[in-house]
Amino acid sequence: QVQLVESGGGLVQAGGSLRLSCAASGPIFSVNDMGWYRQAPGKQRELVAVITSRGRINSLDSVKGRFTISRDNAKNTVYLQMNSLKPDDTAVYYCNAEIRDRLYRTRTYWGQGTQVTVSS
């Protein structure tokens, strides 16, 4: 069973930093795009940043210069380094990945979500 497991959320003061990690495991053949979404209370889930298997990155304008997405293809892991955090960054952060399994089935997987709370 392919799954994504996240870690690294928590409570931090404004201006602080957190690093999120998300590891894909199971019968994986290949991992395509990996990314992070977030959902704040009462708001729709939004894309924060995505990185392709070749390292091409797209990110939300409001996090550019503060958040950095990266990945380790050997470990099937994606990271989100979040600096200069603001209270508006408070949300549940979800990892997302498009994965082809060893039966050559491709689908999108989601992590369980990790809470990030930024206090003012």
Image (cartoon, rainbow, N blue to C red):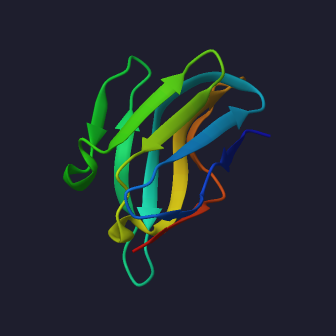
Residue 37 position (above or below residue 98): below
Q: Assign the N terminus to one quadrant of the image.
A: top right
Q: Residue furthest bottom?
A: 42
Residue 51 position (above or below residue 5): above
Q: Nearer the viewer, residue 69 or 5?
A: 69
Q: What percent of the width, then of the height, locates residue 27? A: 77, 27
- Taking the spot 53% from the left edge, 40% from the top edge, the residue there is 97
- Taking the spot 61% from the left edge, 60% from the top edge, the residue there is 113
Q: What percent of the width, then of the height, locates residue 103? A: 71, 26
Say left or right for 37 vs 102.
Answer: left
Rendered image quadrant of residue 21: top right
Rendered image quadrant of residue 9: bottom right
Q: What percent of the width, then of the height, locates residue 36? A: 46, 48
- Taking the spot 62% from the left edge, 32% from the top edge, the residue there is 105
Q: How many marks?
A: 0
Residue 66 position (above or below residue 51): below
Q: Nearer the viewer, residue 54 or 92?
A: 92
Q: Nearer the viewer, residue 98 or 93?
A: 93
Say left or right for 48 vs 80.
Answer: left
Say left or right for 27 vs 93.
Answer: right
Q: Assign the C terminus to one quadrant of the image.
A: bottom left
